[in-house]
Amino acid sequence: MEDLEDPEQRELALARKDVVIQSLGNVLRRYRLRPEHKSLAPDGQPVTGDTAGLLRRRPVLTAPVLTDLTGKEGNKLIERLAGVITAPADYRTDYGSRADRWNSLVLPVLRAMGARELTERTGMSRRAVERALPSSPAESDGAPCFDQSPIRAGGG
């Protein structure tokens, strides 16, 4: 009988496509040592299997412009469990972002950089940059005027 608590033995068993049955004791022993991602240790550091004491709340920072709306429906569970469907696009519903990232994040940075610096970094003419860059958010229709591929600094 193999020791399936040994990571190498467990990996070999899984590679042979053996059905690995775990006892409740095995599950509980491993659960006790798993990291706790939703909390911080009393000293503010990430929680480990050796952390002791009252855990603190882990701060979560976000903004609507950084939030994507995704459905949590249990779509095609049987097919997913059987491994027939593995691509998230085949079972997950994405509703898009909560805010327009181009106007909220990119355009303000481009405006702050100014036409001169953008001309130097992109190789575009100053006039092309000025035409492509609306001077105020009201002038932008939400569709980017620039190619949204990354701008390389230093001519690279």
Image (cartoon, helix red, strand yellow):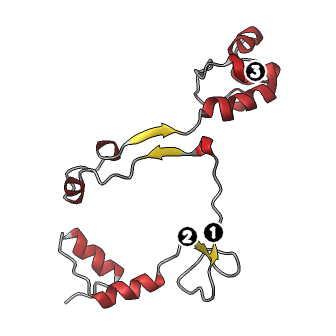
Taking depth in this image into account, of 16 and 58 the one nearest to the observer is 58
- Callout 2: SS: loop
- Please provide percent x and percent y for residue 83: 22, 56
Q: Is residue 2 above or below residue 69?
A: below
What residue would you read off at disc 3? 136
Q: Which amino acid type is shown beneath numbered disc 3?
A: Ser
Near-viewer residue (66 or 35): 66
Picture coordinates of residue 43 (x, y %)? 71, 80
N-term mark: 3 or 2: 2
In three-dimensional space, the C-alpha distance between marks 1 and 3, rounded to whole angstroms, equals 38 Å
Q: Determine which residue is flagged by label 1.
A: 58
Which residue is denoted by mark 2 in the rendering? 38
User: Residue 1 at x, y = what percent?
Assistant: 19, 90
- For this orientation, the residue located farthest to the top is 127
Marks 1/2 in contact by CB < 8 Å: the verdict is: yes
Q: Mark 3, residues whose alpha carbon is within 10 Å: few (<14), some, or many (≥20)? A: few
Binning the other alpha carbons within 10 Å of mark 1 as few (below 14), some (14 to 19) or many (20 upward) gives some
Q: Earlier in the sequence, mark 1 or mark 3?
A: 1
Q: Which residue is depicted at the point 18% across and 69% down?
A: 17
Residues at marks 3 and 2, CA–CA distance in whole angstroms: 40 Å
Estimate how packed mark 2 is, as few (under 14), some (14 to 19) or many (20 or more) residues with alpha carbons within 10 Å.
few
The residue drawn where x is 22% and y is 81% is 21
In the picture shown, does residue 98 fall above or below 19? above
Would you identify the image quadrant in which residue 57 lies? bottom right
Regarding residue 102, the answer to whether it shows in the image is yes
In the figure, is residue 89 to the left or right of 103? left
Amino acid of disc 2:
Lys
